[in-house]
Image (tube, rainbow, N blue to C red):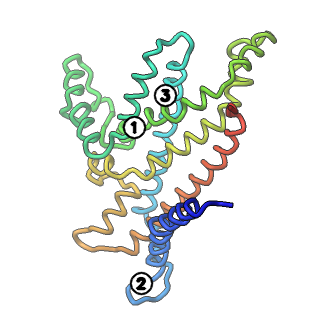
Amino acid sequence: MRSPLAVFFIVLFLAVNVLFMLAPTAMLAIQAVFDDDGAFTLEYFQALAQYQYASSFENSLILSLLSATVGVIAGGLIAFAVLKDDAPRWLRSVVTSFSAVAANFAGVPLAFSFIATLGTLGLLTKLLKTWGIDIYAAGFSLYSIGGLTLVYSYFQIPLMVIIFFPALEALRPSWREAAENLGASTWQYWRLVGLPVLAPSLLAAWILLFGSAFSAYGTAYALTSGNIALVTTEISAVLSGNVVSEPQIGAALSVGMIVVMVLVLLASNLLSARAARWSVKS
């Protein structure tokens, strides 16, 4: 039988979820299907098919897919290198500490840092020009989807390092020893044992990084001033437009975004549950 204190905290937790998650979501859904006169309509959801809003979802999805993929690959390789048996013991502490800071370094400070480094007049851009390398003439632009992917990778890679450490540590040394005793090469071990075991964790991490990029706002807005249509920046534009404010469109965009995020979280929970079967039991 649960103690009264445990029941109190469970009820409190559920109340907080209802108050700060379910209630705002319900309010957005209601606002998106009723016009100013209170009549039911689906025109605001239909408006999402317009090029401006459809392209914002497309750009957000492309940016999230690219940055999540870069984060998983680069972060996974860094985590693997840090946890190798021949890696210095102090390396993990340094990488973990840096990753904890970098994973939370976003918004205006991150945008300013990249503008000062890789902007058209950035320090690294000017330095490369003195060496005869003009990255902007070659087609690079910090103020594009590719540039945003690079900027997002700054916090996506450290986040991947942090969340992937436990999955790598869960690989049992006995599996590697058994594979070697049976004559398996390093490639065969990773192809037939290591990667299949890590696959659910890799997919779950990829989905989490996707959700992180899909919901980001401050960095993209500060870097591009809203010139690249993303769902988050479009929501801001329709809610605080200088010409006209369209809260119902903003609500419809928010509901569409919530649907994507709910699907991401559901998939993440399913994959995490599957990955848990391979965790080391104490």
Residue under label 3? 74
Residue of label 1: 103
* Quarter location, residue 142: top left
The x and y percentages for residue 195 are 67, 28
Nearest to N terminus: mark 3 or mark 2: 2
Instruction: Specify the quadrant of the image occupied by residue 100.
Output: top left
Is residue 136 at least partly visible in the picture? Answer: yes
- Give the image location of residue 98, x and y in percent: 37, 28
Residue placed at 36% from the left, 63% from the top?
Answer: 235
Q: Earlier in the sequence, mark 3 or mark 1?
A: 3
Q: Amino acid at mark 1?
A: Ala
Q: CA distance from mark 3 to mark 1?
A: 14 Å
Q: Give the number of marks.
A: 3
Q: Relative to residue 148, is residue 65 drawn left or right?
A: right
The reply to whether the C-beta atoms of the residues labelled 2 and 1 are less than 8 Å apart is no
Camera-side mark, 3 or 2: 3
Question: Residue, x 43% and y 16% (percent of image)?
Answer: 90
Question: How far from the left and from the top, in percent, is residue 64?
Answer: 47, 46
Q: Is residue 46 visible?
A: no
In the rendered view, tell whether residue 126 sits above or below residue 15. above
Residues at badges 3 and 1 in contact (C-beta under 8 Å)?
no
Q: Which mark is residue 35?
A: 2
Q: Earlier in the sequence, mark 2 or mark 1?
A: 2
What percent of the width, then of the height, locates residue 3?
Answer: 61, 60
